[in-house]
Structure formats: C-alpha cells, structure tokens
Image (cartoon, rainbow, N blue to C red):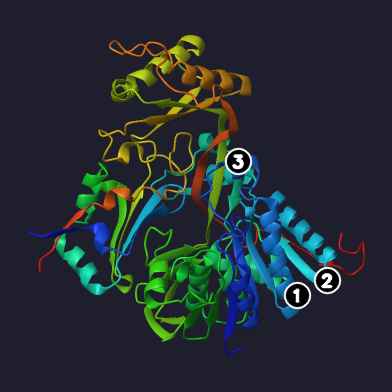
Amino acid sequence: MKSLKIICPNGHLGFAPLKVESFRLGVAAKPDYIAADSGSDDIGPVPLGTDTCASPAAWQEHDLEHMLLAARELDVPMLIGSAGDTGTNSRVDMYVEMIRKIARRHDLPPFRIGWFYSEVDRELVRTQIRSGTAVAGLDARPDLTEDELDATTRVVAMAGVHPFVELLKQECDVIIGGRSSDSAIFAAPALYHGFPEAQAYYLGKVLECASFCAEPYGAKETVLGKITEDWVEVTAMHPGQRCTVASVAGHAMYERSNPYHEYVAGGMLDMTDCHYRQVSEKTTRVTGMRFVPATELRVKLEGSGKVGERFVGMAGIRDPYTIANVDEVIAWSRAQVIERFGPDGWELHYNVFGRDGIMGPLEPLRDKPGHELLVVVQGLAPTREMAEEVTMTGTRQLFYARLPDVKGTAGGVSFVLDEVLPASPAHRWTLNHTMRIDDPLSLFPTQTATIGETATSDA
Amino acid sequence: MTTMKLSDLAKTIRSKNAGTDKITFDVIFREAAAYEQVKRSRALTRQSVSQLLKINPNRITDFVEYDPAYAIKFTILRDRPSGSAGDGDIFGAQQYAPLLDIEIALDS
C-alpha cells in the first residue's frame, strides 16, 4: 500500500452532530477508513465520576449511523475512540449496542465488530503504588497517593494504538474503543498498514479534531487525511473550507500546552521541524515530523472522585453599595451556614458574575464590577438534604445580609427563582497521572462479535 | 509612540483547556509582519502575561513563539482542576479576554 486515506467527520462525536454535506463529500473521496474520537476531558469530572454522558444519545446515534452506513457501503473499517465522552466500560457497551441497533434498523449484511475496555481497577493502581513504582503526576501534580486513590470513584486509562491495531488484526469492520488517545485512533490503521510512526501519529494529530485544522472556522465538518511513507496531506471536504499552511500549522497548537510535542503511550511526536506546504486549493502537505519512542511504556490515567451532593442557587445585585461590599454579603451568608452546620463537612462556592465569576483570581478588572451582578452559589454536602439546606442558606441569607449603610432594607438581592436547583454531584479530577505497564494490551481487554449473521449469533 | 491593541493585530486570540490542569492561550496572526511586530514589542512575554493575570511566572509552563503558524502560545497551570466546584470556566474558553486590550508599540 503506497498511501492510505482516512476521513474524520467530528472532533468529539456526539457532543454536537456532524455536518452531513461535507461528510458525504468525504465518503465520495473513497477513504480507506472512517474514524472519530468521541471523548474529551473538557467536559469536567462529573461524567466520568457518575458514569454518564455529556452528550445526548440521539446525537451520538446520529453520527454513528452516518458513519456506519457509509463504512459498510464502502466496505471499509470504522473506528471510534473514547465511546460516550468518557470511554468507561458502560459507554463502550452502549455504543456497541447502538451499532447493533442501527445495523438491525438498516438490515445491514453481517460484519465484525470489536471493542475494548479502558477502565482500571483501583486496586491495580494501589498495587503499583505499594510496589514502589510511582504513579507519576502530570502537569505539576505530585505522584499519586493512596489517599487520593481512595477519594477516586472511577479510573480510565488512555489507550494508545495497541488495542486498535489488535482489533484490526482480527479483521474487525467496526471498532469501538474505551478511553483513547485521539491521535492513536488514526495512527493505528496507518501503523497497521506499515506506515512510519512519525507520519502515522502526525496523521492522527492533524485529523483528531476534524475541521479545526481548516479555515475559515467551522466545526463538525469532515476532513480527509492522506499518508505516505514521506508525508501527510490534509484536505478540507466542506466546499467553503480549506486546509492552509496557517490553519494546519495552527492546529498543532490546539488544546496542547506546546505546539511541538505530542505525547502518546509509547513515545512522543516531535513537530519541531515540521514543514508545511500548500499543494492545492484545499490541501496542505506536511513533512519533517519525527517520532521518539519512549524508553518505557507509560499510560495516562484519568480519575474522578465525588466531592459531594450539590445544589445551585442564584442571586442578583443592583444596589451599587451592595455591589461594592459583595464580599461582606457573601461572608454573612457563609457565617449563617457555619452557625447551622459548623465549620466543616460542607462547601459553599460563590461565583460573582459581573466581577470575576469567570476568571476568578486571574481577573485583571476585579476592582471594576459591572452595574449589576449575578452571584451563583453552589452548596456541597454528603447528603442531598444537607446540600439543599446549605445552598438555600448560602443563597437566601444573601437577602438578609447586614451591611451598615444599606438603604434598601427590604431585601439585599434579587431572585430569579426563590429556590435552589438540584445539580450533578460535585466531582474533581483526582488522577491526571501516568502508570508504567509492561504489556500494552493488559489494561485494554478486547472482544469481538459478528453482527447480523442471524438473529442470535451476535450475542 | 503609536500603539495598537493586540486585538487589532491578531487574527485569533483564544484560550482552552490543555488537559484537566492547564489552560493554553493562542495568539495567531494573519501574516508575518504583525507577528514580528508583536514579538519585537515585547508586550506579550512570560513576564507581561504573569503581571496581567497576577500569577507567579512559574505557573506559566510553556511560552512559545511559534513561527510556522505566526503564533504566540503560552500555557498556565490552573489553581484547581477544571470542573471543580466553583470553577467558572470548565472549558477554559473565556480566559483570553484580558489579552485583547494589550497595547502593542509600533516601531515603524
């Protein structure tokens, strides 16, 4: 095989639906694979902690349906990573079930599906810690402690290319992955067909966010990547978009702390000496990428731990004197919660929109609040009942705050709703670490099945 | 001395999560001239950014002048992971606003 073509219709499948027109154009270009990642840690720690999705099932199924029908029609494999936003086991099973359902609905001829899981048993991580092998913190985090592990509800490992390649070897037509490194989903088929690591991982890097590597800006449009021994080309499929030197080089920066280095399980893609050249109206060719194999195999772990049940309240402020003293107002409310529940065992968080609700301590204009504020209150506690009362107290007592010179003594804040709203339980990212493994498949058990052969054989 | 706002010189000014613990900022220019102008002005540096955001310079993990894309990029550590209760910007997508008004000295 001299070259290989992969299309990617969506940078986070399910989070918003793919755009059909450019996807059809991508399919018409006769790709060898159709692939997309469905996950992100952008969505915060709640979905992983509660084992839920951040995306509606209808949008996930919409994209899976378009991709499956196109892949089966072209008779090319379809690869999905990080099923259902988080890539937990239940999300993988859910996507496999969606594929079965879509296949039944369209009466598709039999095909082979493979999937792998990414959840990691906490006790396995504990064994590593106890054996003295550091579970190393990323991004200035300390190495993982058992305390922090105990505070963790669920852990997923970030798969590299290995389980995808394994399932390609088993001739799967559809692969549903647990949590996956987005570039690995695209690099895996390229490696499977013998293309060099540098070009393969670059292909993944440039395709993983679909049309984010094209201009003008427009998400969820299909792009096509082509790999050879020497270069990677990327082409925008949408009639109004182009992949330019600027847009492709610029994408190397996107959501990465550094535009030159991309770390995956097994090594590092070095883009320092990448050269970009516009080869046609909609296509840019990239050369000069390198791959530096890792000396030991480490996988990234993501973990989320529950902090507490949560309710949310909101209060508006229009009086300029109260705005100037909003910190005292908040301190009053907090004091009322302490009076009721004591100093510990609950949390109150106040975001003061109109002052620094978005940027917090980073806000340069913190001393120039707007003429009206919205205070968003989050109350956390071990039980829902207590969280509701903490939040209610922390919100309603803003109304009764005792500022010495306030003119408006009938109520210090405005309410859009005189109630507090139930929210998802608060979680936090407890793990952003790497763990050494010997066998790259050991954390990612694979399974296969045939769909559509008879009514029962795909069980 | 004539100055221009960074927002009038740059094509793109954006911020976004880089993982759970960092936010990365991209300032991208349409052409080399504006990019080089901003680099020469020294108005967008590790030092100026740490002053603007009132953070210790050691919280800036990366600061890169990225010639292939005419871009200046830097990354900061969050004070707590994204999506922790009280985080006002889970995606980190609205943290770039203070960069818009940075005054760039024009030398020609």
Let me know if marks 1 and 3 both belong to one chain: yes
Residue A108 — which label? 2
Which amino acid lies under the numbered mark 2 shown in the image of this protein? Leu
Residue that carries the numbered disc 3 in the rendered image: A49
Residue A61 — which label? none
Q: Secondary structure at mark 3?
A: helix
User: Residues under labels 2 and 3: Cα distance?
Assistant: 36 Å
For mark 2, name the chain.
A
Q: Is residue A81 left or right of residue A281?
A: right
The C terminus of chain A lies in quadrant: bottom right
Question: Cβ–Cβ below 8 Å for labels 1 and 3?
Answer: no
Residue that carries the numbered disc 1 in the rendered image: A72
For mark 1, name the chain.
A
Residue at the spot x=38%, y=77% of the render? Answer: A245
Q: Residues within 10 Å of mark 1 (few under 14, many from 20)?
A: some
Which amino acid lies under the numbered mark 3 shown in the image of this protein? Gly
Residue A75 in view, yes or no: no
Question: In the current view of this chain or complex, which residue is farthest to the bottom?
Answer: A2
Let me know if marks 2 and 1 both belong to one chain: yes
Residue A381 in the image, given as x and y percentages of width and height: 55, 23
Q: Earlier in the sequence, mark 1 or mark 3?
A: 3
State the image quarter where residue A78 is shown. bottom right
Q: Earlier in the sequence, mark 2 or mark 1?
A: 1
Nearest the eye: A266 or A198 = A198
Residue at the spot x=63%, y=42% of the render? Answer: A123
Residue B53 in the image, given as x and y percentages of width and height: 27, 44
Question: Cβ–Cβ below 8 Å for labels 2 and 1?
Answer: yes
Residue A64 in view, yes or no: yes
Q: Residues within 10 Å of mark 3 (few under 14, many from 20)?
A: many
Observer-side mark, 2 or 3, equals 2
